């Protein structure tokens, strides 16, 4: 049992400063077991955030796909590609998300950012540096600390992790460059990120130094940038 657990969780070393490469995560098949857990650099109590990631998937329009999940007892910050298209942000247990009718991320790497500010409820999506309309969502809400961040699956049961996974919600494809800030970045910073310029690194998740705990059929590759 011990050996099994050891084989199942492989810690991936971080990328060295100055190295012109990054790590990229591939989920080759649809499973209810493959996922990556990321450990935040600091407390995730959030009254604002910018979440950026790059994703590519060939599951277009077939079903919903989880792109990012932060859960505690319940879902706290989830980002979905909806079945009927669009990108949705869900905060807390609410069954109502903020859905943005942006184009589907397809087989080419798509740079996706979401911003949210509790003070006004303003939320926007940026796709390949282009800004969506602003929606008002969950004004006054605070995202609590103490949960877990998962890529590849929607963890409906953060304690028993895999017991809550649904293969029909999993990400099949590639995801990388997942960065999180506890404030809203400017439009020009997001455009700079998209065009590969160095901007301030995520103060909650910095993809270049974050440790990934990889489970199941998950492949981490080095990728020259
Ligand atoms: Ca689920
Ligand atoms: Ca869920």
Image (cartoon, rainbow, N blue to C red):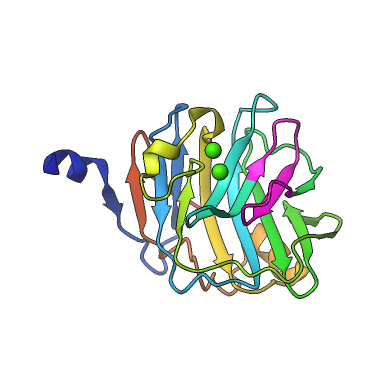
In the image, residue 34 lies in the stretch drawn in magenta: no
Q: What residue is at 54 percent from the left and 69 percent from the top? A: 202
Q: Quadrant of residue 146?
A: bottom left
Q: Answer with left or right where residue 192 lies relative to residue 72.
A: right
Q: Quadrant of residue 188?
A: bottom right
**Residue 91 rendering spot, x and y as whole percentages:** 65, 57
- Residue 195 can be seen in this image: no
Q: What residue is at 36 percent from the left and 65 percent from the top? A: 16
Q: Quadrant of ligand 2?
A: top right
Total number of numbered labels?
0
Q: Quadrant of the N terminus?
A: top left
- Residue 3 can be seen in this image: yes
Q: What residue is at 42 percent from the left and 50 percent from the top? A: 158
Q: Answer with left or right where residue 45 lies relative to residue 195.
A: left
Q: What residue is at 47 percent from the left and 27 percent from the top? A: 30
Decide which of 90, 127 is in the foreground and name it. 90
**Residue 153 rendering spot, x and y as whole percentages:** 48, 40
Decide which of 191, 39 is in the foreground and name it. 39
Farthest right residue in view: 133
Name above or below for residue 88 compared with residue 173. Answer: below
Q: Quadrant of residue 17?
A: bottom left
Q: What is the magenta range? A: 80-97
Name above or below for residue 117 compared with residue 169. Answer: below
Give the dominant element type of the magenta stretch: helix, strand or loop.
loop
**Residue 104 rendering spot, x and y as whole percentages:** 73, 37
In the image, residue 94 lies in the stretch drawn in magenta: yes
Decide which of 56, 150 is in the foreground and name it. 150
Q: Answer with left or right where residue 43 lies relative to residue 109.
A: left
Name above or below for residue 170 compared with residue 90. Answer: above
Q: Answer with left or right where residue 108 lies relative to residue 201.
A: right
């Amino acid at each position: 049992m011990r050996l099994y657990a050891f084989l199942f969780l492989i810690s991936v070393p971080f990328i060295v400063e100055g190295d012109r490469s990054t790590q990229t995560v591939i989920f080759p098949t649809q499973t209810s077991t493959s996922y990556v857990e990321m450990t935040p650099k600091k407390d995730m109590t959030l009254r604002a955030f910018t979440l950026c990631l790059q994703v590519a998937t060939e599951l277009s329009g077939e079903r919903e796909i989880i792109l990012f999940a932060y859960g505690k007892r319940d879902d706290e910050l989830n980002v979905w590609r909806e079945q009927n298209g669009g990108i949705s942000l869900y905060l807390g247990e609410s069954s109502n998300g903020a859905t943005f009718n942006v184009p589907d991320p397809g087989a080419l790497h798509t740079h996706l950012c979401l911003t949210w500010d509790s003070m006004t409820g303003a939320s926007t999506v940026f796709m390949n540096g282009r800004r969506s309309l602003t929606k008002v969502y969950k004004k006054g809400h605070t995202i609590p600390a103490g949960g877990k961040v998962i890529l590849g699956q929607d963890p409906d049961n953060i304690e028993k992790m895999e017991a809550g996974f649904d293969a029909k919600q999993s990400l099949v494809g590639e995801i990388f460059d997942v960065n999180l800030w506890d404030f809203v970045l400017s439009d020009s910073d997001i455009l700079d990120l998209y065009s590969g310029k160095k901007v301030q690194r995520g103060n909650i998740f910095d993809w270049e130094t974050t440790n990934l705990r990889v489970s199941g059929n998950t492949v981490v590759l080095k990728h020259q940038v």
